[in-house]
Structure formats: structure tokens, C-alpha cells
């Protein structure tokens, strides 16, 4: 089965589903189109009985370069747009947590901002050891509210999450592996998808009930963590997105 989208490709091969970001020329950044399409492709999968695992990958050099600067400028000037982005950001995390089967990320290149948040919401993360991972929200004057605070805390612990989210500093996947944010390292970018697909196949071969029940239990744990501060941090992010600091930093980053 295959469904057409502008920014991503969704396919199902037997019991394994695959979502692939397919705009390498834009470094798979989350502009308005991808920000809307990603939760939309995830939403119906919560009720998919025949899927055993989902692989999430990307084309090109970057897994995702994070947020789109032009989108940020438009959102800075529009309260309605900030409200829509908030709802979509909530849907991304909530739809990932609602999936009753494991999600395996194949990280062949940089995962920045929302790209990094997404991999922290996955169950297994296979990454090229030199791939860069960072959440630079604060560098632009934004609160790390699209799931970063909770996702990084769940993966690496509160102290290290604060270290990297309060500075925006980058780490390699090899460093992330040592911290617990990456589960499997590979030597080349091309191996990330190969190994992620192999793991998905091994999961698909297991009895379905045990895997799904275990995943649901982990999701309950994640929801309890996210429920503590996710909506609050996202509200803080939208507040800063509409502020003068973000307008200045994003304008400077665009070189205008």
C-alpha cells in the first residue's frame, strides 16, 4: 500500500510500515507542509491491526534540519498560525505515543530541533555515529517546547537534558549513544536504514501480542512524563515565537 504526500513517502511492506522524509534539497526541514503532513500520516496508524513495526527514515544528508526560518517569521507575525503550529506539534507527539507498535528511527544525518525531538519519541534509534544531534531552540530565543524538554529528559536524564537544551550545543550520535539517546550505532549513513529495517523485521517475526502490550506500557510511562509539562512548555514556545527576540535572531540567521 502506498499513499501520496508532498513531503514524505508512506509505504507498507507486509507487517512493516515505512515513513520516509523525501525533501533532501531542503534538508527535510519542518516547514508548514511537513509540519502538517507528518501528524496526518501518523494519525490513522494507531488503529492499524496488521502493522508490527514502523521505520522512520529520510533521504539525503540530513534526517531533519529542524524548523524552517521562513515559517518562523510568518508565525511571529500571526497568532492564528502559532495556534495552528501548536496544535500540530501536540499532534506529532501524541500520535507517536498512540502507536501500538514500535517505531524505529534510521538517522543517517543531522537531527536538529524538531528532528531531534522526533527521534527521542521513537522506541529504537539507529544512527550513523557521526550524525549531529541538537536542539537549538534557545539559540533563536525559543523555548524548547515542541517535546524537546520531555523527550531529551526521558532519554538522557534531566541534568544532561538541561545541559544541551539550555545551550543548544550539538553532539554526535556517538556521544548520544553514550548518554542513552541513541540505541544502535552504525559506521556509515547508508547502514542506518539497513539496520533499522533488520530490527523491524526481527520485531515483526515475534508474537504480536507481547510486543504490542510492552509498547503500550512504555507509552503509558511516556504519557505520564509528557503530561507533566509538555503542553506548558509548548505554550511557552508559542509565546516566545511571537516575540521580538525571535524576530531579531531569525532575521539575522537569514542574513537580511
Image (spheres, rainbow, N blue to C red):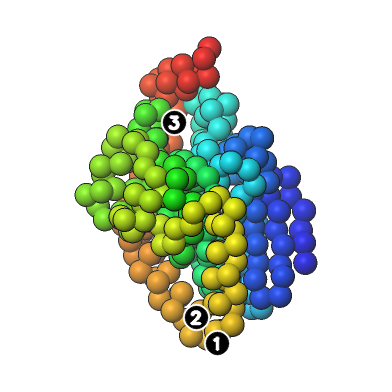
Q: Position of residue 96 (x, y in %)?
A: 52, 61
Dots 2, 1 in contact, CB < 8 A: yes
Horizontal side of residue 22 vs 107, given as left or right: right
Q: Position of residue 14 (x, y in %)?
A: 71, 75
**Residue furthest left as drawn:** 159
The residue lying at 60 percent from left, 37 percent from top is 27
The image quarter containing residue 142 is top left
Horizontal side of residue 156 vs 249, given as left or right: left
Q: Residues within 10 Å of mark 1 (few under 14, many from 20)?
A: few
Secondary structure under tag 2 reads helix
Question: What residue does disc 2 label?
Answer: 211
Does label 1 or label 3 sit earlier along the sequence?
1
Question: What residue does disc 3 label?
Answer: 241
Q: Nearer the viewer, residue 204 or 41?
A: 204
Question: What residue does disc 1 label?
Answer: 207
Q: Residues within 10 Å of mark 2 (few under 14, many from 20)?
A: some
Q: Nearer the viewer, residue 74 or 107?
A: 107
Location of residue 225 with respect to 203 vertically, above or below: above
Q: Residues within 10 Å of mark 3 (few under 14, many from 20)?
A: many
The quarter of the picture where the N terminus appears is bottom right
The residue lying at 28 percent from left, 37 percent from top is 166
The image quarter containing residue 106 is bottom right
C-alpha distance separating marks 2 and 1: 7 Å
C-alpha distance separating marks 2 and 3: 39 Å
Secondary structure under tag 1 reads loop
The residue lying at 55 percent from left, 64 percent from top is 195
Q: Position of residue 201 (x, y in %)?
A: 60, 74
**Residue furthest front as drawn:** 187
Amino acid at each position: 500500500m502506498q499513499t501520496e504526500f508532498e513531503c514524505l513517502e508512506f509505504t507498507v511492506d507486509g507487517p512493516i510500515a515505512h515513513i520516509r522524509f523525501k525533501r533532501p534539497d531542503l534538508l527535510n526541514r519542518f516547514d508548514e507542509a511537513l509540519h502538517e503532513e507528518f501528524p496526518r500520516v501518523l494519525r490513522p496508524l494507531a488503529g492499524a491491526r496488521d502493522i508490527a513495526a514502523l521505520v522512520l527514515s529520510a533521504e539525503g544528508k540530513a534526517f531533519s534540519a529542524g524548523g524552517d526560518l521562513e515559517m518562523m517569521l510568518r508565525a511571529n507575525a500571526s497568532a492564528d498560525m502559532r495556534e495552528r503550529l501548536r496544535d500540530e506539534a501536540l499532534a506529532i507527539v501524541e500520535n507517536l505515543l498512540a502507536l501500538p507498535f514500535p517505531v524505529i528511527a534510521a538517522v543517517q544525518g543531522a537531527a536538529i530541533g524538531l528532528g531531534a525531538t522526533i527521534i527521542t519519541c521513537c522506541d529504537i534509534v539507529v544512527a550513523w555515529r557521526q550524525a549531529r544531534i541538537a536542539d537549538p531552540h534557545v539559540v533563536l530565543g525559543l523555548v524548547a517546547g515542541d517535546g524537546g524538554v520531555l523527550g531529551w529528559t526521558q532519554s538522557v536524564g534531566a541534568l544532561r537534558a538541561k545541559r544541551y537544551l539550555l545551550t543548544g550545543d550539538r553532539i554526535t550520535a556517538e556521544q548520544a549513544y553514550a548518554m542513552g539517546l541513541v540505541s544502535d550505532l552504525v559506521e556509515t549513513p547508508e547502514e542506518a536504514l539497513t539496520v533499522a529495517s533488520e530490527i523491524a523485521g526481527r520485531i515483526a517475526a515475534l508474537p504480536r501480542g507481547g510486543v504490542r502490550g510492552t509498547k503500550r506500557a512504555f507509552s503509558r510511562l511516556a504519557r505520564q512524563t509528557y503530561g507533566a509539562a509538555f503542553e506548558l512548555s509548548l505554550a511557552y514556545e508559542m509565546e516566545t515565537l511571537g516575540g521580538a527576540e525571535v524576530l531579531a535572531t531569525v532575521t539575522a540567521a537569514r542574513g537580511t
